[in-house]
Image (tube, helix red, strand yellow):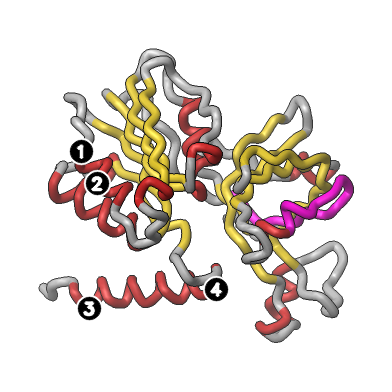
Amino acid sequence: MARRVTELQVLRTERLSPHMVRVVAGGDGLAAFPRTEHTDRYVKILFPLPGVEYPEPLDMDVVHAEYPREQWPAQRTYTVRSLDDEAGELVIDFVHHGDTGLAGPWAAAARPGDRLRLLGPGGAYAPDPSADWHLLVGDEAALPAIGAALERIPADHRAHVLVQVDGPQDELALPGPAAAAVQWLHRSAAGGDPESTQLLDAVRALTFPTGRVHAFVHGEAIAVRELRRHLTRERGVAKDDLSISGYWRRGRDEEGFREFKAAERAREEEARPVG
């Protein structure tokens, strides 16, 4: 991921659903934002801590070298929904659940002219046009990347899309190929149980078309772990045909999620056979 800070200004915001806020940003800084071909291009949004004076323009190399860690800006990871060079607009969609968290409340309160500072983008996935069909699976956090991927899939390709949201009011229009089948899963139908296997059960029940699938599966870390096992062990999806990762972990902020991922990697290393 690029280390250079891109500084933009909020142009406008839009409430897409009760739990999704779109922030459209632009400005002179957009010209230097690195262009990539990935549809899962993610950025680290920087939130300077109140009361801490940072170098202007913000330089994270200087911050890391000269400031104690507890004074570093907080970071939250989001996927760029779209980038329109002609209009000079970069779009990021934020999940918003009231006053909980950092980025969601910021997006809900954002006004034109507010600063948006970010690192990136990263990313590694774009739909493979040579695949026979596509599988896109995730929750609200994955919706921007799923939407961007659907717009890139060739018009005559088949795609199966499964997205978990709180309820019918959180469904969004997803432009894509005519052959795309979109299935919305509502937590409210599962009693709102956060530990529900609703998404996993839906993928298990899906009849896979013949041919090679290219899959994108992202969302809550524990749910994604089980989906990985199902797709690789029971469905035989090849590693190179699967983009899969946890975007977040229930009950943890991003700092806590990074600790969780580090512990998971250590656990996997310990479990790996020697020799």
Mark 1 closeness class: few <14, some 14–19, many ≥20 residues within 10 Å: few
Residue nearest the viewer, comparing 115 with 143: 143
The segment highlighted magenta reads 106-121
- Mark 1 in CB contact with mark 3 (< 8 angstroms): no
Question: Is disc 4 placed on a helix, strand or loop?
Answer: helix
CA separation in Å, label 1 and label 2: 6 Å
Mark 2 closeness class: few <14, some 14–19, many ≥20 residues within 10 Å: few
- Mark 1 in CB contact with mark 2 (< 8 angstroms): yes
Mark 4 closeness class: few <14, some 14–19, many ≥20 residues within 10 Å: few
- Mark 3 in CB contact with mark 4 (< 8 angstroms): no
Q: Which residue lies under the disc numbered 2?
A: 201
- Residue 270: image tag: 3
Q: Amino acid at mark 2?
A: Asp
Q: Quadrant of the N terminus?
A: bottom right
Q: Which quadrant would residue 80 be assigned to in this image?
A: top right
**Dot placed on the residue nearer the N-terminal end, 2 or 3:** 2
Q: Amino acid at mark 1?
A: Ala
**Dot placed on the residue nearer the N-terminal end, 1 or 4:** 1
Q: Amino acid at mark 3?
A: Glu
Q: In percent of the image, x 62 and y 40: which residue is there?
A: 17
CA separation in Å, label 2 and label 3: 29 Å
- Mark 1 in CB contact with mark 4 (< 8 angstroms): no
Position of 36 with respect to 57 (left or right) is: left
Residue at the farthest left position: 275
Q: Which residue lies under the disc numbered 4?
A: 255
CA separation in Å, label 4 and label 2: 30 Å
Is 101 one of the magenta-colored residues? no
**Dot placed on the residue nearer the N-terminal end, 4 or 2:** 2
Question: Is disc 1 placed on a helix, strand or loop?
Answer: helix
